[in-house]
Amino acid sequence: MKEKPSKSESPREKERQRLLDLIEKRPDGDDSLAAGILLSDVIEHYATKYHLIEPFQKENLKPASYKLTIGNEYSVGGRIHQVSDTAPNNVVKIPSFEVAVIKTRETINLPKFLIGRWNIQVARAYQGLIWVGGPQVDAGWVGYLCCPIYNLSDQEVVLKYGDSIAVIDFEKTTTFHEGKSKPYLKPGDVPDRVLFEDYQSERLRSALSTFITGSIEQFRGQVNALQARVDQFISITFAVIAVLFAAVALFFGRPETPSWWDPGLLWVCVLALFMSMLAWVNSKSAFQWFSGTAKIIFEFILLGILTIATFTYATRNQRRVDQLENRIKSQEQRLEKMSGTTQPRETPTDNKLNEQHK
């Protein structure tokens, strides 16, 4: 009687011992008179008596095949993921144009007179999944089955733990001759690939998916750069407009004695300076304070405030000019009235001329 593996044994040793125990349960010879491809009753006979499929579920039997289901490990995009029968870890996601390597839940334990042929289910093929593995499992194989599956569709395919993914059928071989027929395994040995990581599935990535992802990232970078240039152009344009407004306001609406604390002049200068600094910051740095739409709205608001301030400043100056013109007109009217009522004074020279004339 063999000793059971201790708790200190590694997962590889435990799995190896499990496979060796399954090999011991194989039949020494074919006890069925069946020939050709095994039908469901013969598959059930070998599965229940000799552990051909472990674990075996009768509801997965088909007339001449058996449905294989998704196991507890899969890899996609160069990463290995664990799957369980409880949410949320019971989901297998295969992105568009990506390759996934899925391990079956079932262990296949083939005697030396049986081979297996497996392929993806037709229903999965209609979801866009393409089988890219070898279809035959040689006589003498023991272990899980792992195969790359390519998602050719433009949508992510979502599967769950225990979902059927492939079908396998079994076929009888010719008589095995000791010493002449080549065995799959040596006595007391197991396959080289025992654990899922032995398949090095993390190295398998879709070239198309990598190319598309890289192209999308490159295109996104170009769009962001173009958006930054547009934002800079808009910021600089508004800054120039602000400076022009300030220059027009100062040139055409300046009072006789301007002061820096004048409200209109102060607001125009502050807003022009702020918008100029905003344009300079955006043109010199990749850091953006606002999104494109928010920035445009904000700059329109600033432009509106600047326009109102300029208009207010010009209106005040025009009012002052009108007041000065009214004062000048009133002074002129007073002078005209004073000149009309006052007589001119005679000089000594004028008196002498008047006497001589007499």
Image: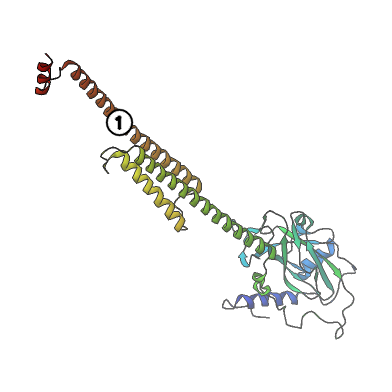
* Front one among 350 and 123: 350
For disc 1, the neighbor class at 10 Å (few under 14, some 14 to 19, many from 20) is some
Which residue does the image show at 9% across and 16% down from the upper left?
Answer: 355
Q: Position of residue 161 (x, y in %)?
A: 66, 59
| Snapshot quadrant of residue 260 | top left
Which residue does the image show at 20% across and 22% down from the upper left?
Answer: 335
Q: Is 57 positioned to the left or the right of 36 in the image?
A: left
Which residue does the image show at 67% across and 69% down from the upper left?
Answer: 204
> Where does the N terminus fall, quadrant-wise?
bottom right
Circle 1: element type: helix
Q: Is residue 287 visible?
A: no
Q: Check disc 1 and give the amino acid type.
A: Val
Q: Position of residue 251 (x, y in %)?
A: 35, 41
Which residue is under mark 1?
321
* Front one among 335 and 210: 335
| Snapshot quadrant of residue 158 | bottom right
Placement of 279 over or under 31, stated as above or below: above
* Front one among 105 and 198: 198
| Snapshot quadrant of residue 206 | bottom right
Q: Position of residue 302 (x, y in %)?
A: 41, 42
> Where does the C terminus fall, quadrant-wise?
top left
Q: Is 80 positioned to the left or the right of 139 in the image?
A: left
Q: Is 319 positioned to the left or the right of 211 in the image?
A: left
